Amino acid sequence: MTGPGRGPQTPPVSIGPATAVGVFGVGLASGVLSGMFGVGGAVLTTPGIRALGATPIEAVGSTVPPILPGALSGTVRYSRAGLVNWRVGVVCGLAGTVLAVAGAWISDSVDGHLLMVATASLLLYTGISTLTQVRRHRHAPIEAEGPEADLEHDGDGALRTAATKVHPLGQLVAAGAGAGALAGLLGLGGGVVMMPVFTRILRIPMKVAVATSLVAVAMFSVPALVTHAALGHINWTYSLLLVAGTVPGAQIGSKITLGASDRTIQTLFGLFLTVLAVIYGAVELAAFAG
């Protein structure tokens, strides 16, 4: 097999104890991120293992296996709290499944550095749009009902009602398809795409959006995993260490979100993605230029 990302680029490797601990720590942190914000966690694991020695295509492919266990771990916690909108999550997950495969196949013919820069651009857009939304809500009058009221008062009853609301099928299919394509292409869980769609377009309160995003993330991580494995993009030494940290991390992250307000979680989400995008993009642009 030949091509920019096929098997010969990702042979099994032995890594030192310090690197192993570092990769596990990245997995733990990404699990917290997944549980808090409803993302796959690759927004942290991709640059994390890249800094720890992974090649660009390994950094894309090796972060896919931890997405599924991390998303499932967080989903279980949120489901017990009654915050998962299963219809939204399942429809978006199904719509994104086929597109995730297509995105993963396309990634095999694209320069790995360009994928990293594209990932940074997506993170920056998502972070800035989230912070813009929080600022707009802060200065807008709060209505007695609706998602803005949920952001302010965070009532359990209102959140559980939002978890059963029926949204237009076409919007759900479009959101899932777009997120799935980007998940496969960039090695992301897709949550960084779905979260702004859920909160801004579908007007789903943040906690319900986080819980529901994890359902879809888990579903279309499966075909992305199979495709990246078939193409030889996955370095399993990195992946298994990431998995070991992701599962407990997701439990910690979901606990934090359940105890915080929607507005606080949105602000943290936006700030984290914006800072990460700037650092991540600068490093990759410098490497690409060199």
Image (tube, rainbow, N blue to C red):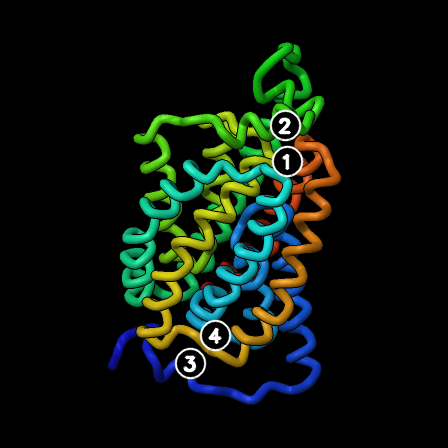
- Foreground tag (2 vs 4): 2
Mark 1 near mark 2, Cβ–Cβ under 8 Å?
Answer: yes
Mark 3 near mark 4, Cβ–Cβ under 8 Å?
Answer: yes
Element class at badge 4: loop
CA neighbours of label 1 inside 10 A, class few (<14), some (14 to 19), many (20+):
many
Disc nearer the start of the sequence (3/1)? 3
- Foreground tag (3 vs 4): 3
> What residue is shown at x 67% (from left), y 36% (from top)?
267
Give the amino acid at mark 2: Val
Q: CA distance from mark 2 to mark 3?
A: 42 Å
x, y (%) of residue 18? 70, 81
Residue indicated by mark 2: 134
> What residue is shown at x 56% (from left), y 59% (from top)?
70
Disc nearer the start of the sequence (3/4)? 3
Disc nearer the start of the sequence (2/4)? 4
Disc nearer the start of the sequence (2/3)? 3
Residue indicated by mark 4: 55
Residue indicated by mark 1: 266
CA neighbours of label 4 inside 10 A, class few (<14), some (14 to 19), many (20+):
some
Label disc, if present, on residue 10 of the rendered structure: 3
Quarter holding residue 130 = top right
